[in-house]
Image (cartoon, grey):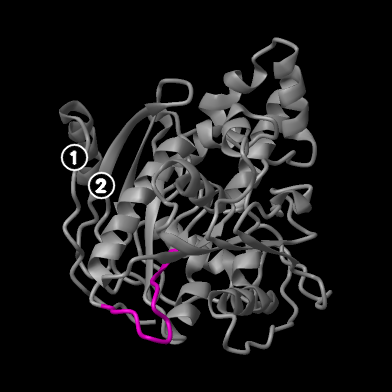
Amino acid sequence: MRALACAALIAGLALAQGSGAGVTSADPAVAGTAEPAAQALADAITAGLLPAADGRQPKAIVDTGSGGSGWAKSTASAAVGEGPEMTAALAAFAYGLTHPDAAPPGANRWDCKPSAAHPRPVVLLHGTWLNAYDTFAYMSPRLAKAGYCVFAFNFGRSGLMEGGGIGTVLPGRFGVGPMEESSRQLAEFVEQVRAATGSEKVDIVGHSQGGTVANRYLKFDGGEGKVDKLITFGATHHGTSLMGMASLGRAINNLGVNILGFYEPIVGLSNIQQAVGSAFYATLNANGDTVPGVAYTSVGSRYDEVTNPYDWTFLRAGPDATVDNITLQAGCEQDVSDHLTMMYSPRSASIALRALDPTTPTELACTFNPWLIGGGGGL
């Protein structure tokens, strides 16, 4: 049992890894949809949120109530005050610890209006135990400089006592609440973006759990018809074995010993949901991987130590949907990005730009991008 406990803890820590100048702009009003008691919790969480570098105070978007085990709770909040552009994952992670509510550079400029060339705003979704800034401090400014209106928020916020797991003792470790609730938080955020930009549809770029939450939103929470493209990197679309550890835990569960339930308070509900074979995925993919009318791009890395086997991130196209499954190293063996550093890979950024606008020729970058550090090996 002690060995399995250590394995679960290591798995949780692995998921934690997978996780310009400041520009100020007015945030749109955030509509509260929580029940009164839940809203009181949201207000309490809001009171504890650190202000952004520009002085603005982030607000809880909505308290989402319980889900999954029945005791886990989470909230979502706007990312405010742009942090600096980063080229290395470790540097961004460090900044995100001290500025957990910072927006990635180029994001959440609420006066941005999509152009004829790029008519849809882009919504960015972080992964488990990560935040909007430390996931997209490299990619977000590149999308903004290319002319896109970019928006990001922090979903699945939950403390240790609310079922978020031990990772939440560190600042800015989000994406830990029930994924069903995170999906509904995404639905509300998309409505805010559509209202602010006047756009009928958005495009979504998601990393890790962010891709799975987007898929859930498309299928169950009103996203169908509101999303044109879904681009994911290392997404846990079909769960993960975490190099076999999650598969072992699921096998033990299936024998009648609720080992995963025991570790839920340690690693958080969303991590348990992402273990291969969970009830969450049985529901999510019961009618196939895709929904009609969406163009999907799913990118995986051979060196992904969290979403593995890495090709489990790939999708199969259903009716009236297209899927482009891409292995990051195909044609670029020197890119050895892992789960976290793939978001700091020049190749990943160029793949995202090409997927967002296939009509504009975009040459795929190919540079050395190392495991763990990213940024070409420099901080």
Q: Amino acid at mark 1?
A: Asp
Q: Is residue 161 above or below residue 106?
A: above
Q: Quadrant of residue 242?
A: top right
The residue under the point 62% across, 89% down is: 361
User: Which segment did they paint magenta?
Assistant: 112-123
Examine the rendered structure and indicate whether residue 181 appears above or below residue 1: below
The answer to which of 282 and 128 lies nearer the viewer is: 282
Indicate the secondary structure of the residue bearing disc 2.
strand
Q: Is residue 63 left or right of residue 345?
A: left
Magenta span dominant secondary structure: loop
Q: Give, as a three-letter code, the residue at label 2.
A: Ala
Which residue corresponds to mark 2?
A: 60
Residue at 33% across / 60% down in the picture? 79
| Percent coordinates x, y for residue 225 in the rendering | 42, 57
Is 343 displayed left or right of 162 in the figure?
right
**For residue 43, which numbered disc appears in the image?**
1
Q: Are marks 2 and 1 in contact (CB under 8 Å)?
A: yes
* Residue 138 in view of the camera: no
Would residue 11 be seen by someone viewing this image from the given angle? yes
